[in-house]
Amino acid sequence: MTYLALMQGAQGIIFYSYAASSWNLEANAPLYQAVLQMAAEIRANEQMFGERIAWWPADTESHGPPDTMVNEMGEARISLALFRARNTDNRYYLLAANTTDKPTDFSFKLPFENVEQLPTTCSDDDFQADLNRIRKTYGPFEVCIFGPIQGVIADE
């Protein structure tokens, strides 16, 4: 949910904790560690959330039966967002997030010509690439960050 908020243009994230007499966050070690890890991850990657590109020539395809294209809200299972990195002209980050608890086979075409390298936070073994089209089966709630990508958007 944190990445989806940032992908939709949130300018900041704040974590707060609810405490009750029978429950508090610090006593729930796995959740507490996950929140700390997420906050550190966002801080370490904050430079990638520069200018959100509102429109770009997104060419996407869902692979599988029609009911695997959308989530419970009727939105695309895979959410994509493109950002121009802070204080740069032609360095971008593309984020892809599976919004469901189901594996989703999805592909998209990069909006750049002649991309020679595509660093990603996801394992390279999981991808099929052909003519700048990237195909992957995204795991439940998986987020992949692609970049930095040097280039110019085709229609910009």
Image (cartoon, rainbow, N blue to C red):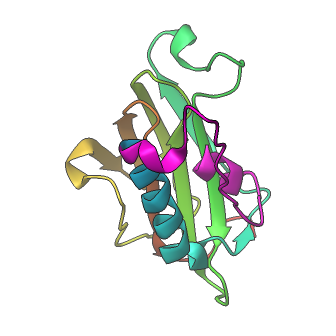
Q: Is residue 16 visible?
A: yes
In the displayed structure, 65 sits above or below 16; it is above
Is 90 positioned to the left or the right of 116 in the image?
Answer: right
Main SS of the magenta part reads loop
Percent position of residue 93, x then y: 55, 67
Q: Where is residue 2 in the image (x, y as percent from the top left)?
A: 61, 50
Q: Which residue is drawn at 41% across and 28% down?
A: 105
> 128 or 148: nearer the eye?
148
Res. 153 in view: no
The structure residue drawn at horizontal position 29% and vertical position 44%, both measured from the top left corner, is 128
Q: Provide the residue span drawn in magenta.
A: 1-29
Quadrant in which the N terminus is drawn: top right
Residue 131 percent coordinates (x, y): 40, 53
Q: Is residue 133 above or below residue 141?
A: below
Residue 119, magenta (yes or no): no
Q: Of all residues shown, which one is farthest toward the bottom?
A: 87
Percent x, y for residue 95? 54, 55
Q: Residue furthest front?
A: 21
Instruction: Please give the name of the residue rendered at 57% of the width and 28% of the height, measured from the top-left corner.
Output: 77
